[in-house]
Image (cartoon, rainbow, N blue to C red):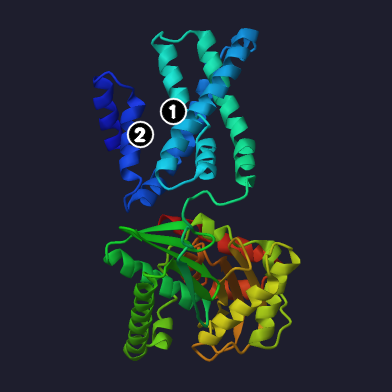
Amino acid sequence: MGIAFILAGILEKQGLALIIGAYIAGLSLSKTDIAPVIQERIRGLYEFFVPMFFAIMGMMVNVREIINPHVLIFGGVYAVAAILAKSLGGGIPALLLGFNSKGALRIGTGMSPRGEGALITCGIGLAIGVLDNQFFSAAVFMIFLTIVAAPPLLGAMLKIKGQGTRKPVKNDDSVHETWKFETAEIADLVVTNILGELRSEGFFVQTMNIDEGVSQARKDDIVIVITEEKKSITISTTKTDMPFVKNEVYEVILELSHNIEKLKTSSNPAEMKKDLFDTDARTTKNILALFDSHYIKLDMKGETKEEIITELVDILAEKGNLLDRDLILSDVLEREKTMSTGMEHGIALPHAKTDGIDHNAVVVGIKKEGVNFESMDGLPSRIFVLIVSPKKDSGLYMQFLAAVGSILRDESERIQIINAAKPQDIVDIIKKYDHLLHK
């Protein structure tokens, strides 16, 4: 933005329009590695100012002038001349650069619409008094006609049979490779490490679409597109760059495998689990708001871990706000296979990140008799708190799991929760922790 403003100021000082300086800045940066990064960073400004610009330009048009027959006639003739000028201006150079007459016509027609550049120039002319209202209105009408006329004209040009170049065009040499993994989490980990390696090698990495898992890495003339879909990743690039990509993926997976083996020998998740219930965990209003009496069941029927988890998920499903009930259940059970979420003091915290839901959701279940949940202290679990969260949204998921230790830390209050007469009583007990919000 600074470069654009500096160049705009210099050219304005020399008697030229501000837009020319800004255009030079954009043109200079458009073919660099950081072009997509710049586009991503200034997208908010673009979406705010561009509609405002068109609205202001529209308000500058005198409607009485634009419906004047003389203005309409002149604007129509002006539009035809503008389309011909752009067709010649774009088509003649195309003829000199390997295109035949068909290709030149297509390029010239595609270049014919006028847009913000013409509007800015006309606005400057009106502001400094070079243009009067009638000519400004005619110019706006011309811009409108060239925009509306371009799609059907270009469609007609494209319907002309035959290629638009004198020599056959080489086929697109882009290729795709797909790697499949056991879980979506492993795919996430591999993608994260690939992107990290590419950054360390000087690539500019841009997240194109977070929800769809699309990323792009650029360096010089190398473009690599990485698409993550559930348990697989697909990488697209040119044939000549694919060997580099394959080596990169191989090294990343090899390094991950090596580090995972080290992790297995250097840490003990079972021992770490004992420290998860910390009474000083942060609690926020958003965390407390996840507890809802409609999602609390006081008389769980299940007799096994799997039955309890299924019952909790079904409570969510009954409210009809899930994307995929079966997927949620599968993901929670899969997480449970990794290590039991049975904690101490009769508490179990089944949880998972899943594509089966688009928001954070919590369900509380009580079973006074208790169920074997493979808890750390070997005692039956009687309080079950299920939380599920979207995979692509960090949200309050981890904060909630940490905060449960503070919320359920007091034995007397755990007994009150187990013996609650109605769901709202449990919510009231939990909401007493508002005083922890200063932490």
For label 2, the residue is 23
Q: Looking at the image, which residue is at 51% across and 21% down?
A: 57
Residue 330 at what x, y percent from top left?
Answer: 63, 79
N-terminal-most mark, 2 or 1:
2
Q: Looking at the image, which residue is at 25% across and 31% down?
A: 6
Residue 361 at what x, y percent from top left?
Answer: 61, 64
Q: Looking at the image, which residue is at 37% across and 73% down?
A: 245
Q: CA distance from mark 2 to mark 1?
A: 9 Å
Residue 405 at what x, y percent from top left?
Answer: 48, 72
Q: Residues within 10 Å of mark 1 (few under 14, many from 20)?
A: few
Q: Amino acid at mark 1?
A: Gly
User: On screen, 138 above or below 348?
Assistant: above
Residue 367 in sight here: no
In the rendering, which numbered label is found on residue 216?
A: none
Compared across the picture, whether 27 is left or right of 58 comes to left
Residue 362 at what x, y percent from top left?
Answer: 61, 67
